[in-house]
Amino acid sequence: MGTPGEILLQHELEVMAGILESKAQYRKIVKVGIAKWVNDFQDGLIEIKTVEDLRKLVELDIELQREGF
């Protein structure tokens, strides 16, 4: 067992690793959503007036890429 400071640091590292893993998984989901949107748009299933969904997906992707938690 380590000192309380070492235990706390280990816990914080584990939490940060979990957050990074979650962000990576969320980015995969967002990327699939963006690709689906683009394909549907190219197939004529989406009209240009509905680009708000794409904007939200892109903003979410950018947010997930930011370094800060």
Image (cartoon, grey):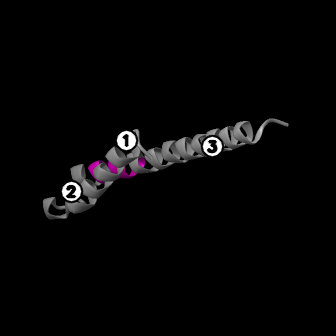
Q: Which residue is mark 2?
A: 44
Please tell me which residue lies in front, 31 or 40.
Answer: 31
Q: Magenta-highlighted stretch: main secondary structure?
A: helix
Q: Gap in Å between the C-alphas at discs 3 and 2?
A: 48 Å
Q: Gap in Å between the C-alphas at discs 1 and 2?
A: 33 Å
Please tell me which residue lies in front, 26 or 53.
Answer: 26
For residue 12, the mark is 3
Q: Gap in Å between the C-alphas at discs 1 and 3?
A: 19 Å
Does 17 appear in magenta?
Answer: no
Say which element carries label 3.
helix
Q: Is residue 15 above or below residue 54?
A: above
Circle 1 Cα neighbour tier, 10 Å, few/some/many (<14 / 14–19 / ≥20): few
Give the magenta range: 32-39
Work out which quarter of the rendered image holds the N terminus and state it.
top right
Q: Position of residue 14 (x, y in %)?
A: 66, 42
- The amino acid type, in three-letter code, at marker 2 is Gly
For residue 47, the mark is none
Quarter where residue 18 is shown: top right
x 25%, y 60%: residue = 45
Which of discs 3 and 2 lies nearer the camera? The answer is 3
Q: Which residue is mark 1?
A: 66
- The amino acid type, in three-letter code, at marker 1 is Arg
Which of discs 1 and 3 lies nearer the camera? The answer is 3
Quarter where residue 46 is shown: bottom left
Q: Left or right: where does residue 42 sit relative to residue 61?
A: left
**How many discs mark residues in the rendered view?**
3
Which of discs 1 and 2 lies nearer the camera? The answer is 1
Q: Earlier in the sequence, mark 1 or mark 2?
A: 2
